Image: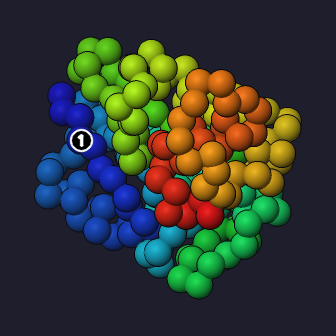
């Protein structure tokens, strides 16, 4: 059994399928980990999202900044940027199902057996593993909640720009999100 970690697909399903053929991926025994940014930039964002969702338990997915951007836009917050390739997803017949599935994905994955953590951008050195998992869970809980819109309304931004354990509320969630995903898109 092998575990393959793949990052930043950016909506490029064809190269992913070619990679899976090249590594001789065996779904009955191998696992795939996707380190965020499943969509946006490539021209197969919708197909990529559907494919990864169809992998079920064979795929471990974490959210990247492009995935969070899609979720925010789908909830009416943020705007599509030049070069975004999200329109097809936003108008898809299964959009709501895809967005609900995406909202259920974590910001961070820890595999005890492999003693390995996967995030999209990294973990600040001031956080322990326990902190990392706890802080990720805070944002994940908000993403799954009925009040997710208040998060998306304030998700974009670079302040606070330094971690402080006394941060609370939406400022805390934005800081956590930025640390896990870089602030490149969350402006």
Q: Could you say which quadrant of the image residue 168 lies in?
A: top right
Q: Nearer the viewer, residue 138 or 127?
A: 127
Where 109 falls versus 61 (above or below)?
A: above
Q: Which residue is drawn at 59% across and 24% down?
A: 165
Q: Nearer the viewer, residue 114 or 181?
A: 181
Reading the image, the residue beneath label 1 is: 4
Q: Which residue is drawn at 27% across and 43% down?
A: 5
Q: Could you say which quadrant of the image residue 185 lies in?
A: bottom right
Give the secondary structure at mark 1.
strand
Q: How crowded is mark 1: few (under 14 residues within 10 Å), some or many (20 or more)?
A: some
- Compared across the picture, whether 156 is left or right of 52 comes to right
Q: Residue at x 40, y 28 (%)?
A: 126
- Compared across the picture, whether 167 is left or right of 29 comes to right
Q: Nearer the viewer, residue 154 or 115?
A: 154
The scheme the figure's colours follow is: rainbow
Where 92 falls versus 166 (above or below)?
A: below
> What percent of the width, then of the height, locates residue 128?
39, 20
Q: Which quarter of the figure is the C terminus placed in?
A: bottom right
> What percent of the width, then of the height, locates residue 10?
43, 66
Q: Which residue is drawn at 57% across and 77% down?
A: 84
Q: Which quarter of the figure is the N terminus placed in?
A: top left
Number of marks present in the image shown = 1
Q: Would residue 98 be seen by someone viewing this image from the given angle?
A: no
Where 2 falls versus 162 (above or below)?
A: above
- Compared across the picture, whether 68 is left or right of 37 comes to right
> What percent of the width, then of the height, locates residue 83?
53, 82
Q: Would residue 172 be seen by someone viewing this image from the given angle?
A: yes
Q: Nearer the viewer, residue 13 or 6?
A: 6
């Amino acid at each position: 059994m092998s575990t393959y970690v793949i990052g930043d697909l950016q909506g490029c399903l064809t190269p992913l399928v070619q990679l899976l053929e090249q590594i001789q991926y065996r779904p009955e025994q191998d696992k795939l980990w996707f380190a965020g940014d499943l969509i946006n930039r490539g021209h197969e964002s919708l197909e990529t999202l559907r494919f990864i969702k169809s992998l079920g338990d064979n795929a471990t997915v974490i959210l990247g900044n492009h995935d969070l951007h899609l979720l925010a836009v789908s909830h009416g917050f943020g705007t599509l940027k030049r070069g975004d390739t999200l329109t097809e997803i936003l108008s898809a017949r299964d959009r709501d199902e895809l967005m609900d599935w995406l909202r259920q994905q974590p910001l961070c994955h820890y595999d005890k057996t492999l003693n390995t953590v996967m995030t999209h951008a990294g973990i600040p050195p001031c956080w322990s593993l326990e902190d990392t998992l706890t802080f990720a869970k805070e944002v994940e809980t908000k993403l799954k909640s009925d009040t997710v819109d208040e998060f998306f309304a304030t998700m974009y931004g670079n302040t606070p720009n330094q971690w402080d354990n006394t941060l609370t509320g939406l400022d805390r969630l934005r800081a956590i999100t930025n640390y896990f995903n870089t602030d490149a898109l969350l402006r």
